[in-house]
Amino acid sequence: MRHLMPLRYIDAVVRAGSIRKAAEALAITSTALNRRILAMEQELGVPIFERLPRGVRLSTAGEILIQHVRSQLSDMERVRSQIADLSGVRRGHIAIACSQAVLPVFLPQQIALYRREHPAVTFRVYRRDREAAEQALVDHTADLALVFEPVRLSAFETLLAVQQPIHAMMCKGHPLAKAGPVRLRDCMRYPIAIPTHLYGVRSVLDTAVLRSSIKLQPAIESDSFEFLRHYARQDTTICFQIPIGIASAPKGGDDVSRPIDDRDVPPGILYLGQLRGRSLPVAVSRFAAQISSALARMFEEAQPR
Amino acid sequence: MRHLMPLRYIDAVVRAGSIRKAAEALAITSTALNRRILAMEQELGVPIFERLPRGVRLSTAGEILIQHVRSQLSDMERVRSQIADLSGVRRGHIAIACSQAVLPVFLPQQIALYRREHPAVTFRVYRRDREAAEQALVDHTADLALVFEPVRLSAFETLLAVQQPIHAMMCKGHPLAKAGPVRLRDCMRYPIAIPTHLYGVRSVLDTAVLRSSIKLQPAIESDSFEFLRHYARQDTTICFQIPIGIASAPKGGDDVSRPIDDRDVPPGILYLGQLRGRSLPVAVSRFAAQISSALARMFEEAQPR
DNA sequence: GCAAGCCGCTGCAAAAATTGCAGCACTGGA
DNA sequence: TCCAGTGCTGCAATTTTTGCAGCGGCTTGC
């Protein structure tokens, strides 16, 4: 849509932090971009940006404006999508910000399933910790967020919530590698590998441990689940993951997972959500419905808390 | 704002019903307008208008688009207003759709009061029956609606509701011209002048009469309250009005008003409302707050029903 | 302490877009 | 059947936008 180019320009400048960088990203000259910004500011009667020696920053007025700009841009996207939808073409774009846990199995499966029906729909998947995921909704980088144990929920409108008990994972030959729940204190007899505080799994474990006598003494700490898991395969180290992040094939994998007993660690909650008050494009809401029903089918639906 | 000219153009064409008429209203050539419409349609990939021999009409896609267009336009207005507000300039524009009753006294007073504080704010006042008033909110012709006994309330978000008992009005020398409530059957002994069914006063009277043995036999029926009132001054005819439409000066007027007894006619309700879900420009919401408190001070606040 | 590197901004000319005029084809009503 | 009214198009004039080169201001690193 041609007429909202000026809005795109403003958004680009905000994201780039400088007019020249934004111009490069937009494949136009800095001159042109600069003049459009100046023109907008004159129309508005107020500067949108503060000029700094190293670029520009939003002014107070700009802060108000950028909210409007971003909602306009994504709303136009919704309109396009609705119009395309009624002429039978199922196209669109879906951007998702999500926790690591859904990256290896769940999301690839679901997206593939969806694209089988609607090949004209494109996807973008951002791996974001629970705080950054909400921010992505706010600045319209993402349409949906699928996060485990989000922190603040002010701009977040929950579409679905499912329980996710923490599982302990270990290599096949591990002494604890049996079926059924395992007690946390049994795990603690072995070296443990856990993620950093950015992650929901860690925060659930931390709060659970607080009210018990057990102490978490991690042998390995990392911000990469992939690393933790591969490390745990090497020896008797135990790592932790939630069910949605564990391949469903029960015997094919190199490792074994056992739920930690409810009495030790209560289940965490995985949330699917969108920006509060926004009306989603058809493609997005259809995809949200699909993964909602998949999640609800796979896991117990959680009460909002 | 320059960049939403295309949107204004579309809106103008929709309202005018033909490109040439809209072009005239916009003070540009039909050629230019026509080409912009064509360009928009090409960008969208779908016709916005159906071409008729006598003009154009919105297509299905256009119906979706015009909603977006109008909300964009008024949202931009809100942003401008917010930005102007933070730089201390209290300017803006307020459009109100209202029932006749508030036109003679209440609204002029309130607007004058408001403009004394904020002279840079401009007003537009539309006289609309209760159905048209809601429509004016929907198509963004009006920011606020102040209507007596609205019919449908689907797009209408109530900001305040106050009770308005129906009053009987008569000339000074009338046999009924005393203080205190009057019974409806006493009024019926004289010729009565009442408004058409478009009006809330009529519908309140009609429903009240339905459950009694009294029959409404209007001597005069008109869609102009002003006419009815002036007519009633001529002889013993009685007309009806709600308190907000009656000048507060108790003895200055040429006529006398007496509330009709609650047992005969229950009070109607006057609603102040806006378009559901819309966030109003600062000027508008400030004015809404002003008249809300004025109404609440003058009349008993009604429970929503 | 001074040069190098970014930054936003501006004068001027080229390029691109928008606009206006005149005119065409079409339709429904007098 | 004619006429008024509609949307649409080719072409030229006009307006707007863009790009190039360059200026002055500021921070950073040697």
Image (tube, coloured by chain):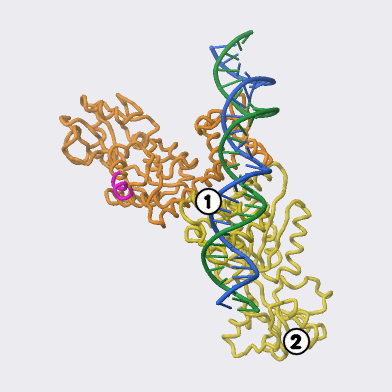
Chain colours: A yellow, B orange, C blue, D green
Query: Pointer 2: what residue?
Result: A237
Q: Which subunit holds the residue at mark 1?
A: A
Q: Is residue B127 above or below residue B110?
A: above
Q: Is residue B47 magenta?
A: no
Task: Give the residue displayed 15% in from the left and 30% down from the top.
Answer: B173
- Please name the residue that numbered disc 1 is placed on: A40
In which quadrant is the C terminus of chain A drawn? bottom right
Query: Where A275 falls versus A32 (above or below)?
Result: below
Q: Amino acid at mark 2?
A: Thr
User: Left or right: A227 with respect to C10?
Assistant: right
Left of A173 or right of it: where is B215? left
Identify the residue shown where x is 29% and y is 30%.
Answer: B226
Give whichever of A251, B231 is nearer the camera.
Answer: B231
Q: At 63% across and 81% down in the image, what residue appears?
A: A205
Q: Is residue B263 visible?
A: no
Q: How many marks?
A: 2
Instruction: Please report the bounds of the magenta region as a residue range.
Output: B112-118
Tell me, yes or no, whether dots 1 and 2 are on the same chain. Answer: yes
Foreground pick, A213 / B78: B78
